[in-house]
């Protein structure tokens, strides 16, 4: 008999043996064909001469099964009128086995249907390799949405004459299949509906398992994209968000590899590929989770999730896959709209999924402008010459237009995301013609709709002598590609505002390089209307004052300015990762946004728009760049709820009090109002600007108390201008006039005040304490403060480099006798091992470093350079002491054999070619002599460089110890904040 499990008591389908099971109404319960009632339960032959009978000869469960014989074609088999209803999803499972003596074959469950007005279709539901040695499970999901007739479910075989049994066929309606979870654990010994994308072999395996006892082994891959795929068509709804997760492990004999999780979708047969989880390193012997979220933004006729590698065809295992619908939280309607709280256009980047569902609601409520993130770039709009595609661009422009939003076009000419064909066989004339066609086509299409265009993007490289990026555009066409792009865009839409857009414009070198370019082009008559500042920042660096300095600098050119891609990472480096972001970091981020928007509001006369690069954390590009990690850089969280960052923009009074931290290195500067060398060893910690008042603050710890410095910017002198240092609740006041006192009646601190070109400087010696507040007030009532904890730290080590030019040969020549020697003695791993005596010289733009290493046993066996016997030299030309690397900061590693490796920013692109070195082995160790070019600053006597050095000691393939000169944190390779200082001298 058939087993019926009621799911919903809304409708019932009467079932009798041998009667059609086609559903006149929606099936609301599991339908099982078990063939235990002595009939075929509605299943009949498909094809002439085919026989379908109930038999006791074989059964998966119970005592009977269904036998199919007499086949003469692969499509012959057993068939039934399908119990499927349009728009409803089903899971179909069955068990198959071959009659004894039959060769192995693929048995498949397939649906035949004829869409109204169309041709008959044949759609595979499930398939498996079947033998005569046991029952094989077939399982898959099925959904059709077009009105159709003659809907049949049938079983067929790749062996045209093969005979087979079927049993325990179960059809399970999913209700709303897009809300039902999908999972695979492979514990039943099958591939559970996963299929190869090409030649890969998939097999349930007991050799490895993440949980339980089995996983899916993937081998025989033909390409990096070849591997396991799961059909999820009908299991995702357009506009809905899903969480996907799978665990992966390297297969036998694979020692290294990177795996990622992706989606393939097709519409009208055209495939597209989207990343869910970027490829991650999978160490040998370890299970690694690949996880991410995905929103289906298109109508599709094919949809699958698959695992792929970034390179190679190594074998791997996967286990415990899950896909779950994420119920969205309603957006908050009881909070102010961002766009109503700022004096400029408040914009957000968006992609097609962001315009759907609650994401679209959030955009419409809070933002008055949008920037399509990818849909208007060259690879999206003209992937092949003359073949323009505007579906996604039109969709987003229409969305913005319906909601009355200003639209920024991003971007017409860029060195990235430009198809290879643009540059192939291109001389200057050909390239500029292609550029003109592309620009004119896009700008004309959206004339009157797109208000501003990023005409050229990221064309500046401050490390080049002329400040221009050596892109293919520049190499072929020089500056004429920029001139052409602006000219043609202006001709196509004279009313559109045309921008040059770049990143790192808040840094002085990049700022000045871009400034010079814009000034030159405007003087030539190039129609540049504005400058876009991307502002991909982090919670600590750079200071908001640097952003303001950039806006004020470009204001002198009379151009419009826009903040085009704002986000604030919670990380200060390119390596760290949190499983859960600490709440105090989110609070700190809120204060960071507050300081930035204070700048934007002050500069509103020079700014027409501020755009955040995504409306909520879940869509941020920083989830996958520079590495895959949890990041939260935007104003709304993953659930689209307001964060401290939002309140930092809208109502900073809702933020928790800021709790900053400052180290006070040991020191005893003279309290005389002069800025001693002691203070220059560190940059000042900024005290945010309020009105025209701002400051920088430092402290030094000593047995006498806490030495403090405040560099105050306050252009208008007043008798009540003052700095108040509050230590553990006790205020100490130093007035601009030089008067000092304690607000609690105790004697005033030892203090000195001197005027500066922009304000005044305060030095004072106050009692030691932990909780410190520095408040700067002026006579007009403006006040700004720094609040946090100050902790004592070791003194900053200082050494010097004499002005000499040694011969770079690994020999200690006479020039080195002028250089003082330092020793590595700060252990960050182990307590003994290889050490070095280090000296430095400089000449022209080059820093020379000599390291004489005591290390009797040398090894380069490890594939990791930091686990080899080596010397590392760390140089920060600006002595910025930042919690990360700036573009010109470098980590230069030289092994005992002279092998050079370079670290720094994500790709160390700004410094990787700046080092030359020679190494020589000597009795008891080795000598390293290095020359490091520092082209970003002018070296001169008195210049201070952030500087440190480290010796790595190896035994075999293992690093056994590491020792530095100054930095004791073990983070020398991540940030520059604890490096020592190298002072250049003439002698």
Image (cartoon, rainbow, N blue to C red):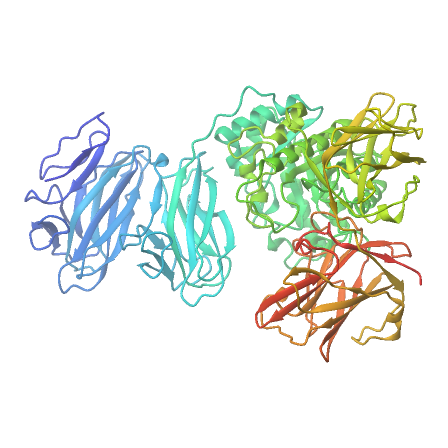
Where is residue 68 shown, x and y percent of the image?
13, 53
Closest to the observer, 492 or 54: 54
The residue lying toward the viewer, choosing from 151 and 510, is 510
Give the image location of residue 634, x and y in percent. Answer: 61, 35
- Point 79% across, 63% down: residue: 932
Position of 419 relative to 700 (above/below)? below
Residue lying at the far top in this picture: please name it: 334
Quadrant in which the C terminus is drawn: bottom right
37 relative position to 319: left or right:
left
Nearest the viewer among 533 and 207 is 207
Residue at 65% x, 35% y is 589
Residue 948 falls left or right of residue 255: right
The residue shown at (17%, 46%) is 168
Camera sees residue 912: no
Q: Nearer the viewer, residue 865 or 493?
A: 865
Residue 142 position, x and y percent, is: 30, 41
Q: Quadrant of the N terminus?
A: top left
Q: Position of residue 917 (x, y in %)?
A: 75, 70
**Residue at x-position 15% and y-position 49%:** 167
């Amino acid at each position: 008999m058939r087993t019926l499990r009621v799911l919903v008591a809304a409708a019932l389908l009467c079932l009798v043996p041998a009667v059609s099971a086609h559903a006149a109404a929606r099936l609301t319960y599991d339908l099982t064909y078990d063939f235990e009632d002595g009939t075929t339960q509605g299943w009949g032959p498909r094809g002439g001469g085919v026989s379908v009978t109930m038999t006791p000869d074989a059964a998966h469960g119970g005592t009977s099964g269904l036998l199919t014989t007499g086949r003469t074609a692969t499509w012959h088999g057993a068939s039934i009128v399908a119990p499927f209803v349009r728009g409803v999803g089903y899971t179909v499972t069955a068990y198959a086995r071959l009659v004894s003596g039959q060769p192995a074959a693929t048995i498949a469950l397939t649906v035949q249907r004829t869409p109204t007005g169309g041709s008959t279709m044949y759609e595979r539901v499930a398939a498996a390799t079947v033998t005569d040695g046991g029952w094989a499970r077939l399982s898959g999901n099925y959904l059709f949405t077009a009105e159709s007739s003659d809907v049949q479910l049938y079983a067929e075989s790749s062996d045209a004459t093969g005979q087979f049994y079927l049993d325990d066929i179960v059809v399970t309606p999913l209700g709303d299949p897009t809300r039902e979870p999908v999972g695979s654990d492979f514990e039943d010994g099958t591939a559970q509906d996963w299929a190869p994308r090409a030649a890969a072999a998939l097999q349930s395996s007991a050799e490895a398992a993440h949980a339980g006892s089995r996983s899916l082994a993937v081998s025989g891959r033909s390409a990096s994209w070849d591997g396991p795929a799961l059909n999820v068509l009908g299991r995702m709804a357009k506009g809905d968000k899903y969480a996907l997760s799978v665990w992966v492990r390297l297969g036998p004999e694979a020692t290294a590899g990177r795996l990622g999780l992706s989606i393939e979708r097709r519409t009208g047969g055209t495939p597209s590929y989207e990343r869910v989880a970027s490829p991650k390193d999978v160490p040998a012997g370890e299970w690694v989770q690949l996880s991410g979220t995905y929103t289906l933004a298109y109508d599709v006729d094919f949809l699958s999730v698959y695992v792929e590698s970034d390179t190679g065809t190594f074998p791997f295992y996967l286990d415990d896959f899950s896909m779950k619908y994420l119920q969205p939280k309603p957006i908050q309607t009881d909070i102010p709209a961002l766009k109503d709280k700022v004096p400029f256009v408040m914009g957000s980047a968006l992609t097609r999924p962001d315009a759907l569902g609650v994401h679209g609601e959030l955009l419409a409520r809070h933002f008055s402008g949008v920037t399509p993130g990818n849909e208007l770039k060259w690879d999206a709009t003209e992937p092949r010459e003359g073949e323009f595609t505007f579906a996604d661009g039109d969709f987003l422009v229409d969305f913005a237009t319906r909601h009355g939003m200003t639209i920024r076009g991003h971007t017409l000419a860029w060195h990235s995301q430009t198809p290879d064909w643009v540059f192939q066989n291109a001389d200057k004339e050909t390239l500029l013609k292609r550029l003109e066609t592309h620009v004119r086509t896009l700008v004309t299409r959206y004339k009157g709709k797109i208000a501003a265009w990023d005409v050229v993007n990221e064309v500046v490289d401050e490390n080049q002598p002329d400040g221009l990026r050596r892109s293919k555009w520049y190499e072929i066409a020089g500056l004429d590609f920029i001139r052409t792009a602006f000219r043609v865009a202006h001709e196509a839409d004279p009313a559109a505002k045309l921008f040059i857009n770049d990143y790192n414009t808040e840094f002085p070198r990049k700022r000045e390089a871009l400034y010079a370019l814009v000034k030159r082009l405007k003087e030539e008559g190039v129609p540049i209307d504005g400058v876009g500042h991307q502002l991909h920042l982090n919670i600590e660096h750079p200071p908001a004052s640097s952003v303001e300095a950039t806006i004020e600098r470009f204001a002198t050119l009379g151009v419009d300015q826009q903040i085009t891609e704002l986000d604030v990472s919670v990380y200060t480096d390119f390596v760290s990762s949190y499983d859960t972001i600490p709440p105090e970091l989110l609070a700190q981020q809120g204060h960071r946004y507050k300081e930035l928007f204070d700048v934007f509001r002050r500069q509103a006369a020079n700014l027409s728009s501020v755009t955040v690069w995504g409306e909520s954390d879940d869509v941020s590009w920083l989830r996958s760049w520079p590495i895959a990690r949890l990041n939260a850089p935007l104003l709304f969280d993953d659930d689209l709820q307001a964060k401290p960052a939002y309140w930092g923009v809208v109502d900073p009074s809702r933020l928790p009090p800021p709790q900053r931290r400052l180290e006070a290195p040991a020191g005893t500067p003279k309290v005389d109002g002069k800025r001693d060398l002691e203070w220059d060893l560190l940059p000042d910690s900024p005290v945010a600007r309020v009105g025209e008042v701002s400051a920088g603050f430092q402290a030094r710890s000593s047995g006498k108390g806490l030495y403090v410095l405040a560099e105050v910017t306050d252009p208008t002198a007043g008798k009540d201008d003052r700095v108040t240092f509050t230590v553990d609740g006790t205020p100490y006041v130093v007035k601009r006039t030089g008067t000092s006192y304690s607000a609690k009646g105790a004697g005033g601190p030892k203090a000195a005040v001197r005027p500066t070109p922009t304000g005044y400087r305060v030095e004072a010696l106050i009692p030691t304490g932990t909780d410190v507040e520095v408040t700067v007030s002026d006579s007009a009532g403006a006040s700004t403060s720094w609040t946090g904890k100050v902790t004592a730290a070791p003194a900053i080590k200082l050494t010097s480099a004499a002005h000499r030019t040694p011969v770079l040969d690994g020999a200690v020549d006479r020039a080195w006798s002028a250089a003082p020697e330092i020793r590595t003695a700060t252990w960050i791993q182990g307590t003994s091992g290889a050490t070095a005596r280090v000296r430095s010289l400089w000449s022209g733009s080059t820093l020379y470093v000599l390291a004489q290493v005591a290390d009797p046993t040398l090894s380069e066996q490890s594939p990791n350079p930091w686990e080899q016997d080596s010397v590392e030299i760390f140089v920060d030309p600006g002595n910025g002491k930042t919690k990360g690397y700036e573009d010109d900061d470098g980590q230069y590693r030289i092994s005992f054999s002279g092998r050079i490796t370079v670290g720094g920013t994500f790709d160390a692109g700004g410094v990787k070619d700046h080092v030359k070195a020679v190494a020589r082995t000597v009795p008891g160790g080795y000598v390293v002599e290095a020359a490091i070019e520092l082209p970003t600053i002018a070296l001169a006597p008195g210049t201070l460089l952030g500087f440190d050095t480290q010796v790595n000691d190896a035994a075999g393939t293992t690093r056994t110890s590491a020792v530095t000169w100054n930095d004791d944190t073990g983070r020398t390779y991540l940030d520059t904040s604890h490096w020592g200082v190298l002072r250049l001298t003439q002698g």
